[in-house]
Structures are given as structure tokens and as C-alpha cells.
Image (cartoon, rainbow, N blue to C red):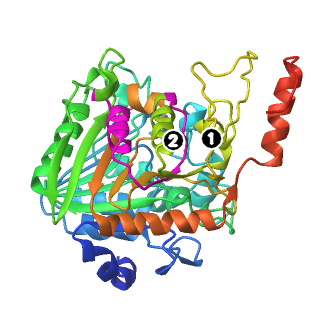
Amino acid sequence: MKYFSSILVSFFLISSAFGVEVYFNHNPRSQYTDPYRGINRRGDNLEAVIIQKIQTAKKSIYLAVQEMRLPSVALLLVEKKKLGLDVRVILEKDYNFDVLHQLVGGAEEEAEGTDNRDLRAFVDVNRNAKLEISELESRDAVYILNKGKVPVIDDSFGPSMGSALMHHKFVIIDGKTIIMSTANFTLSCIHGDYSTPSSVGNPNSLIVADSTEMAAYFNEEFMLMWGNGKQGAFGLNKRLRAPKTFSVAGSKITVQFSPASKSVPYEQTTNGLIIQYMKKAQRSFKAALFVFSEQKLVDALEERHNAGVEIGTIIEARFAFRDYSELLDMLGLEMLGLNCKPELGNKPWKNPIREGAMATLPGGDKLHHKYAVIDGKYVLVGSHNWSDSANSANDETMLFIENTSISDRFTQEYNRVLSGATIGVTAKAEADIQKRLDSCGRKGLL
């Protein structure tokens, strides 16, 4: 653990200046050495931040994350459990397995899990193609938790039987400190794919806030899912709760958890609250998103665009030019679906944006951000992808932060990603649109 404490010193002073601590694993002003591959790289070590905060725990540690593959975090949780702390872990059912079992992925739009071959290579320290007990005990996070008798459940423990995703990524420490990240607790989301030297991790953010009031709200969410430790409430089996707003060290933070039933008025859902914040935009709206597939959100954004608000959006390359991607609408394009029909309610913009981009990243890394900055004042960030499934099916967190200093940090990250992105429609996307038109017997390109 000495390694982690030593590397934190270089960026804690910068990141904690705003009261609420903000970190980016591609922060160009920080650097660290990947603890598993020995690669020197730019960025904040998100794993080290998580470890440093968990080390301070005296009473309880509640962790809810889609996937957990960080052995140092798992070993620390076991250590804290042995010291008598109340340690509990909730995972997504598709990732509640050790390396001896086969990975089962979720829906494509939300598929973010570690490649099973990469996980096996990571655990096979001596590279003899055999998994030894000592390797499992030092490298396989889920194995470590189970062997250490840390209570672990997943969303199949509830009546929903894991039908949607437990997509949260938060930790509650001693009922007063919250860690909330867009990153899963995996090498690929934080440091980079173990078997790919060029990979430097999916771009992600992490926020730490000290607030007993806000922690109590997160604790309520955790305990709804935990239930009695054998059966809890996940997804739509949880009761609907209105968003709550907290004052945290000079920042105004509103928290909303998903999902909400489609019988609930849309304005009361997380996506509905996103629209309420969109309407505040007077000057600029900049978003970096893993996926953007919700029609109502892009329609609301078009209203601000037509009112003169400067719009900029960067989407993960895998999803930027799919038929359901709202980036197409923003660029004034339309791609027919496999049924030769456009997406229901599709509405390409008559006045396309100029700053519509596809993220260009090294080594198979994915743009995993899920945030927007409005007028340099508000930050919307969380585990919540901008999709219907995040809004109406998955367990998700969304923070709405009012703080200009924090907004500046997220704007800097947006500009960093944009500097290497591909702006506008790509030749491949045009070809894909034309190919779909041809296969459907339609004429014309766009």
C-alpha cells in the first residue's frame, strides 16, 4: 500500500482545491506508473484514490459497481473485513464470477466488461497457461472477496433476476464519504487493457465528496438493493424517489437514481431532469458520452441549438454512427435500421452542428465518459448512459453539480478528447448509410 500513498501526493493538492475532489485517468497535468504493467503514463491513478479513501474507513464500506477486477482494492476490503468493519459488495450478475468461469456479456449498448482472455492473462502471472491458487489469491478480485468471506451479492438476488443492469459505480465509506465514478473497477476502465501495451484506459472521471447527508441518500439506495443480503430490490422493483439536492463544500449537488417506470411522467425521470438542465443552457453545451440514443434528449437539445446555444458532442466510436445514435440527428443524417425503417421518432436536424465528433483513442480504448457541461456552470455526470435503458431499466446514479471550478475541469477534459477526435461524419459512416440505403432499395446518400 505504500506505493499508492506515495503517488497520491502529486495530484491531491490540485484536485481537492474545490472541496469536492475530481479526478480524470487521462489528466495531462498528472502522471503515475501503472501498478500492473509498469507503464509510465499521464493521468490520475483512480485506483490509488479509491484505495486511499477506503484505507480511512473505520466502520463501514459499501461498494456497488458493475464489475470489480482490481485485486488491490479487493485485498484491502478483505483486510478491513478482518478488522471488524461492515464490508458489503454488490455487483452486476454478468460479472459476478472469478476467472475460472465464463464471461456472459450484457446488451451491446451497455457491454463494458473485461475481455475474458485479458482477465485470464492478468491472473496468470507466471504465464504458464495454468491458473494456480496463489495467482487467484493475489490477482482475481472476485476470488479474493469470496475467499475472504466478504459478503457479495448481485442483481439476480432480487425478484428482477438480473433482467437489467446493476450499473452503479459508487462506494460509501463510514456513512460520510462517497466515491462516484463513471469507471468500472477494472484495468481497462482505469489503467488500460493488460495485454495491450498501447492501451491507457477508457477515459473516465471519479468524484469524491464528504457529506453525511448525501452519503445517507446513497446508503438508502444501497440498502434497497442489499435487502436482507439474500434478496433485495433492483431495477424497477425499487420505489421511485425524487431527486435530492445537497450543499457540499461550496458545491450544489443534486442526486437522482434510476430507473423509473415508463408509467412515471417523463419529467420525473433522470432523463427528464437532464432535459430540465438542458433548458438552462444559454451559451454552451458540451458532452462526452459513451452512448447517446435517447430521442427525447436530442430533441430537447435541438431547441437549445436553434436558440443559439453552442453545441458540442463527442461519442464513443463504436456507437457514434449506429442507426440509433443521436449524433446522426445532430449532424442532420439518418441511417435506416435493419427493417429498412428509420428509428421511431427520428428527427435529423435541419441546422446540423459543426462540433459533432467520434472519439479517436489508442489501443482499443473506449470513450467511457458520461457527462455534459452547461454554460461552464453545471456538470451532469454519473454511471447513467444517455439511453432509454439507463432511464427505465438499470440501476444508475446521476449527479447534477453546480460549481464553476468543477465545470472548468470537465471542460478541459472535453477539449482534450476533442483535440484527437474525428469531427463530422466519417467516410465509413457515409458508406454504411449508403450501403443500408442500397440494401433497402432506396436512392440517394443522405
Q: Which residue is mark 2?
A: 306
Quarter of image, res 376: bottom left
Residue extending farthest to the front is 307
Of residues 134 and 379, the one drawn nearer to the viewer in this rendering: 379
Instruction: Give the amino acid type for the residue marked by disc 1 in the picture.
Output: Asn
Q: Residue at x 59, y 60 (%)?
A: 122
Q: Residue at x 49, y 34 (%)?
A: 94
Label whose residue precedes the other's in the sequence (1 or 2): 2
- Horizontally, residue 126 falls left or right of residue 191, namely right
Q: Which residue is mark 1?
A: 351
Eyeballing the image, is 371 above or below 164?
Answer: below
Q: Residue at x 66, y 38 (%)?
A: 328
Q: Residue at x 37, y 80 (%)?
A: 11
Quarter of image, res 435: top right
What's drawn in magenta, residue-wise?
Answer: 268-295
**Secondary structure state at the residue bearing disc 1:** loop
Of residues 108 and 4, the one drawn nearer to the viewer in this rendering: 108
